[in-house]
Structures are given as structure tokens and as C-alpha cells.
Image: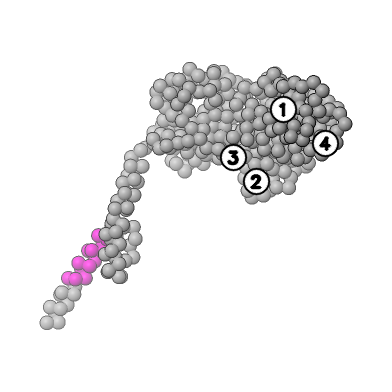
């Protein structure tokens, strides 16, 4: 009798063991074997969600990305673009894709960028990231890419004026808002000087060029917001210096003087800075990107007015600008998040390739000064 009972017990244990094994396959929660009743309930209830997750994983695994994702930037030499490349590489490693990051020698080499875009298209990539120097120059290739069904992700300045539907999403700073932020912070620094002025005062704006959407919007955001703030305080404002922004008013209290070099040249940018610094009514100068900010600093090297007679403000980061902010030559600067620009561009490319919904991403900006540039929330965005 004891042997018979022992056989029954062993048989029951084997059945229980088999049932427990089935339960662990149906659910990722293995422990319930020691309490049979809950284990039986868990094996039945979550069976459908676990199956759905498995199906989703299988579907994702089946969407393999073959071929390189090409990113055609506006430049390659600037530290900003190297930081964008770093972020892109981080995303590529995380998503398990291969990228080819390219950019012209300078941001005035439009024809070189067009050739790079053509080369990218000829390699039949699954997706292309593009920060266009001149959309019109790229237009024919963009149309061919669109016709081939290859998704284009705009980044940094994006691809303004592209055919409808050609650019499926953008990963970029809202440059107009960033320019407004620069104006807001700058006005706090010069408001008292403007209010107490007995004559005309001048605010310089240095723009690298007048074609790229990002540069134009940073300049326009600054000019528009500064004009608004000045007029709100009862001042008349004249915008001069370049036809793109000109709104001249005779006898104005404040002149916003926009300087754009004839070509993207460090020497010409420094000359623009010197011309503005040497005007006796200049109280402030804003450089709307890394190139212009560095031109402002270099232009002041033999003049020495920044941080003393003239408030200097810049955009972007880099060793020269960060050092000038830390030393007080520049009162502050606005920084983008270039790592996020590169990262989000690749991420959006991956999603677009897989047929997932994508939309524009604002990668953000921050105002930094000598007081907050080492803050953990700011420091990661201050690339070298």
C-alpha cells in the first residue's frame, strides 16, 4: 500500500512539474511553482499579452536595415559638426545601423554638398539625413530621392522649401526661439544702458551668411525680439546693415546693425567685428553661431572692448567661446544640443525606414554664463 501511494505521489509530482514548465513558457514570470493555485492563474491570464509582445519582437527583428544611412551635413570642420557626428555615432551603435557622415569643407561650398547628396543617393541608402546649405541647389536630387521612396530626415537647419512630403521629419533646434532667447538674456544686460543713453546706441548682429535657414532664423529671432523689447520700453528702432533685415527709421533711438561677410571667411568675419566695435555708439554685439562668435572674439583681440565697453554675446560653444565666457569677455551664449541633433537624426531615420510614424523634434537650447556653465544640466551641451 505504501508503495502504491508513493507511486501516485511521484506521478503527481511529475505532472505538476510538466505543468509548471508549460507555465514558464507562457509567461516571463517563473517563480509561481511553489504555490500551485497562483501559478495556474498566472499561466492563463497573461498568455495573450506575452504572445503579443513576442509577435512584436518578431516583427521588429524581421525589419532588418541593410545599407548605410547617409547624413549630409552643412560642414565637417567645425567642432559643432563633430559633436553632431558623435551623437549620430552613439545612436548608430544603439540601433545597430551603419552610417556615413559627410560634409563640405566650408559652409559656403554649396556645389560640394550637392555632389555629396548625389553620391549618397547613388548608393541607394535606406534613408538620408540632410542639413541643406541651399535647398534650391539640392532640389533636383531631392526630387529624385523622393521619387525613389527614400525618406529624408532634415537636421540642424533642415531643408526649408523642399517639395511637400520629401522631408518626413526634422531634428533641429528651433532657431527662431533660440534667437529670441539670446535677445531676452541680452536685453537684461543692456536695458539700463539703453534707458540712460542721451544719444543713439547701436546693437551689432553678426551673421555668418544670409542663406542658411538656421543662421537666418537665429538672426531674425534676435532682431525681432530685441526690437519688440526696445519698443515696449518706448524706444524707436532702426534695423540696418543688410537688405534681408533692413527696416530703416531716421532718427531712431537704437540701431540694430546686421553685418554679413561677403563670403564665409574667418578673416572677413573678424573685420565685421572690428567695424562694429570701432563704431562709438556700439554697446553690444551678438554673434549668431560659432563661426560669428569666434569672429567677434578674434576681431576684438587688438581692440579690447568686449567685457568692458561692449557687451558680447554668442551662439554655440567651442573652446574659444567657452573660454571667453569664463573669462568675462563674453557675457554669455546660447548653446544648442548637437549631440541630440545627431542622435535624433539617426533615430528618426531608423523609425522612418521601419515605417513607424515620425514627426519633427525640437532638440532644444540653453543660455549659459560663467556662473552656470559647469552646471550638470548645462555642461554636457558645451562641446569642445
Verify CB contact (< 8 Å) between mark 3 and mark 2: no
Name the element at disc 3.
Answer: loop
What is the distance, in whole Å, between disc 3 and disc 4 at their CAs? 32 Å
Mark toward the start of the polypeptide (2 vs 1): 1
Mark toward the start of the polypeptide (3 vs 2): 3
In the picture, residue 234 is in which quadrant? Answer: top right
Residue beneath disc 1: 206
Q: In which quarter of the image is the N terminus?
A: bottom left
Question: In the figure, is residue 85 to the left or right of 237?
Answer: left
Q: Quadrant of the C terminus?
A: top right
User: How crowded is the residue under tag 1: few (<14 C-alpha within 10 Å), some, or many (20+)?
Assistant: many
Q: Which residue is drawn at 27% across and 59% down?
A: 44
Mark toward the start of the polypeptide (1 vs 4): 4
Indicate which disc residue 195 carries: 4
**Is 15 one of the magenta-colored residues?**
yes
Question: In the figure, is residue 271 to the left or right of 8?
Answer: right
Question: In the figure, is residue 94 to the left or right of 179?
Answer: left
Marks counted in the figure total 4
User: How crowded is the residue under tag 3: few (<14 C-alpha within 10 Å), some, or many (20+)?
Assistant: some
Mark toward the start of the polypeptide (1 vs 3): 1
Front tag of 2 and 1:
1
Q: Is residue 147 visible?
A: yes
> Magenta segment, which residues?
11-23
Residue beneath disc 3: 364
Mark toward the start of the polypeptide (3 vs 4): 4
- Residue 136 location (% of width, % of height): 54, 18
User: How crowded is the residue under tag 4: few (<14 C-alpha within 10 Å), some, or many (20+)?
Assistant: few
Verify CB contact (< 8 Å) between mark 1 and mark 3: no
Amino acid at each position: 500500500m505504501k508503495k502504491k501511494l508513493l507511486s501516485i505521489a511521484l506521478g503527481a509530482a511529475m505532472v505538476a512539474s510538466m505543468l509548471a514548465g508549460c507555465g514558464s513558457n507562457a509567461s516571463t514570470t517563473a517563480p509561481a511553482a511553489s504555490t500551485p493555485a497562483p501559478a495556474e492563474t498566472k499561466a492563463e491570464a497573461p498568455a495573450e499579452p506575452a504572445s503579443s509582445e513576442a509577435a512584436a519582437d518578431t516583427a521588429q527583428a524581421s525589419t532588418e536595415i541593410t545599407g548605410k544611412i547617409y547624413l549630409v551635413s552643412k560642414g565637417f570642420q567645425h567642432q559643432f559638426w563633430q559633436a553632431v557626428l558623435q551623437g549620430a555615432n552613439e545612436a548608430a551603435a544603439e540601433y545597430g545601423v551603419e552610417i556615413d557622415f559627410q560634409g563640405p569643407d566650408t559652409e559656403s561650398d554649396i556645389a560640394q554638398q550637392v555632389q555629396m547628396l548625389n553620391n549618397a543617393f547613388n548608393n541607394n541608402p535606406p534613408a538620408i539625413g540632410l542639413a541643406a546649405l541651399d535647398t534650391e541647389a539640392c532640389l533636383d536630387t531631392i526630387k529624385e530621392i523622393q521619387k525613389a521612396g527614400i525618406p529624408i530626415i532634415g537636421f540642424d537647419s533642415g531643408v526649408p522649401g523642399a517639395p511637400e512630403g520629401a522631408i518626413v521629419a526634422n531634428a533641429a533646434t528651433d532657431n527662431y526661439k533660440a534667437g529670441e532667447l539670446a535677445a531676452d538674456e541680452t536685453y537684461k544686460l543692456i536695458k539700463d544702458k539703453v534707458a540712460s543713453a542721451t544719444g543713439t546706441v547701436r546693437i551689432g548682429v553678426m551673421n555668418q551668411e544670409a542663406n542658411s535657414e538656421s543662421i537666418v532664423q537665429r538672426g531674425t529671432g534676435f532682431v525681432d525680439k530685441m526690437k519688440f523689447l526696445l519698443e515696449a520700453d518706448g524706444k524707436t528702432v532702426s534695423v540696418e546693415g543688410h537688405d534681408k533685415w533692413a527696416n530703416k527709421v531716421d532718427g531712431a533711438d537704437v540701431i540694430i546693425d546686421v553685418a554679413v561677410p561677403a563670403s564665409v571667411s574667418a578673416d572677413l568675419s573678424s573685420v565685421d567685428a572690428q567695424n562694429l566695435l570701432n563704431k562709438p555708439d556700439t554697446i553690444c554685439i551678438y554673434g549668431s553661431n560659432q563661426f560669428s562668435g569666434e569672429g567677434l572674439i578674434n576681431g576684438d583681440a587688438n581692440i579690447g572692448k568686449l567685457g568692458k565697453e561692449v557687451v558680447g554675446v554668442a551662439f554655440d560653444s567651442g573652446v574659444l567661446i567657452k573660454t571667453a565666457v569664463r573669462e568675462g569677455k563674453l557675457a554669455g551664449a546660447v548653446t544648442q544640443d548637437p549631440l541630440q541633433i545627431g542622435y535624433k537624426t539617426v533615430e528618426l531615420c531608423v523609425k522612418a525606414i521601419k515605417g513607424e510614424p515620425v514627426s519633427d523634434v525640437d532638440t532644444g537650447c540653453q543660455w549659459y554664463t560663467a556662473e552656470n556653465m559647469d552646471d550638470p544640466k548645462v555642461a554636457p551641451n558645451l562641446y569642445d
